[in-house]
Amino acid sequence: MKRRVFCLLLSLLLVLCTACACRKSGGGEEDPPQTAETVGFDKSRDGSGRADGSFTFSEEAENALNSVRQAVFDAGCIAGVRALGGVDKSGGPVTQDTQYLTGLFASYGLDADWPFVVELPSSQMVETDLGQEMYVIVPVSDACTVSVNKWICNEENGYVGEPGEVLYRCETGTPILLVSNYSDVFPDVNVTVVGNGMTASFEPRLSLMDGSLTLPSDEPVTDLTPYEPETDGAGPDNIWDQLYGGQLEIIENSVGTWRVPENERENVPVYTVTDLDDNGRLELISTCSHGTGQYSTSKIYEITEDHNALVPCQYGPSTMSSEPELGTMSWAYYYDGSGSRAYIVNDFLREGYDLSHTYKYAMWFAGGEAWVKLLGYVDMYAGADENGELDLQYDYFDAEDRPITAMEYDDIADTFFNAPAPSFIQLYWFDPDDGEPLAQKLQLAVSTFYRSLPNG
């Protein structure tokens, strides 16, 4: 993964997006358009935000975009959002890594159903410093203006949130790929789409409970994410008992054991179900963030060999001052020489405004014990350039504190495991106290764990 400097790119986006008149309906004075195409779809549109026609989609991509825009229009909205899930941010900006994006797009089937996303130029990609969730924003037509601002949510504004620095603005309504949000608690961007007599302002984010897209109900924006069909978890002859021999029932009945006590919580803890070592005995993982969300603690429990109880496991990172952050929507993994899975987990640690670190670990689980090995880390320094603009410096190191290049850091797990690329596992994190049936959440968590992404 070759991921590099993105701050300059973000500042240049405003220059690349030259002005183009926004075509709106006249506030009720004109009849409303009948299709998405009639509200301003310009086939000579420049995908980079310029109006000179230097970039056009292929016919296949253009037809797919028209179809998506029609769905947005039929929903009575000005924009649609599709959530693509989590990304591996450990190596820096993902929008600059063509190889990584190509694999990720393929894993979501975008080549077939949304090919216009695959054809988007880099100028239509917006990424925040710590963004770990990927979205596609599709305005209903070319007659829309799209802007993306940093979303500031802190103690100074009472955590209500307010727009900050402009990251992107374009008046040609071209779809954008957005990578944002470090956590689902506080989104870090605000998206505003104006056109066709409507305005939508929203902060897209993924719910850490079930991975679904969270959008405001009172804004004209629609969720375009394809979700798995809902199920009540019951099948012929109780399929879950057939698959797991009552293990999920044991986990459900042991909720008093694995639920994080209130006196140990700072934020809402979340939980998932896995089989990390492929031994057929399920694990329950709990994780909870503390303070500003930069620290986390986790615990792992596993079904016993006789399938009669759920017991705590030994978790090596629990002895560290800052643990890897397990509560992400997907993990990369490799097979080591013994055939065991090694999961790639990261830890972000901030020491102040101007210095933070990202640590990349490989984590194994076997015999009721989890342990990690440091692969490398990044020191990130925040300062200001001569114009007072944010300037970030990245220094990369291997596990022995030896300086390495950014490319070497990006490929450090591939190199360590002698593999061309990782596989991925998706995770479903849930809150047992939100009113939904716990049994259903446990079933969804274990079924999600086995939905592997590329190379799995």
Image: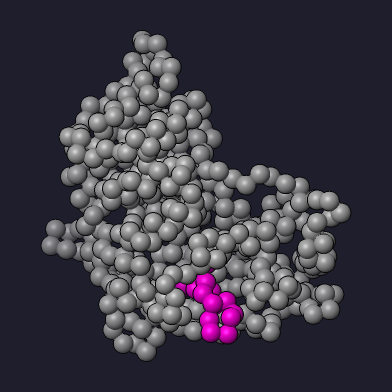
Q: Position of residue 290 (x, y in %)?
A: 53, 68
Q: Position of residue 294 (x, y in %)?
A: 47, 68
Q: Main secondary structure of the magenta part?
A: strand
Q: Position of residue 415 (x, y in %)?
A: 40, 79
Image quarter (top left, top right, bottom left or bottom right) of the C terminus: bottom right
Residue in the picture at 69% in, 52% down: 434
In this view, the residue farthest toward the left is 386
Residue in the picture at 49% in, 51% down: 108
* Residue 155 visible to the viewer: no
Residue in the picture at 35% in, 72% down: 410
Residue 99 falls in image quadrant: bottom left
Q: Is residue 15 above or below residue 448?
A: above
Residue 43 falls in image quadrant: top left
In this view, the residue farthest toward the bottom is 400
| 153 horizontally vs 446: left or right | left
| 307 horizontally vs 116: left or right | right
In-front residue for pair 105/159: 105
Which residues are drawn in magenta? 330-348
Residue in the picture at 51% in, 39% down: 224
Based on the picture, tell me whether residue 334 belongs to the magenta stretch.
yes
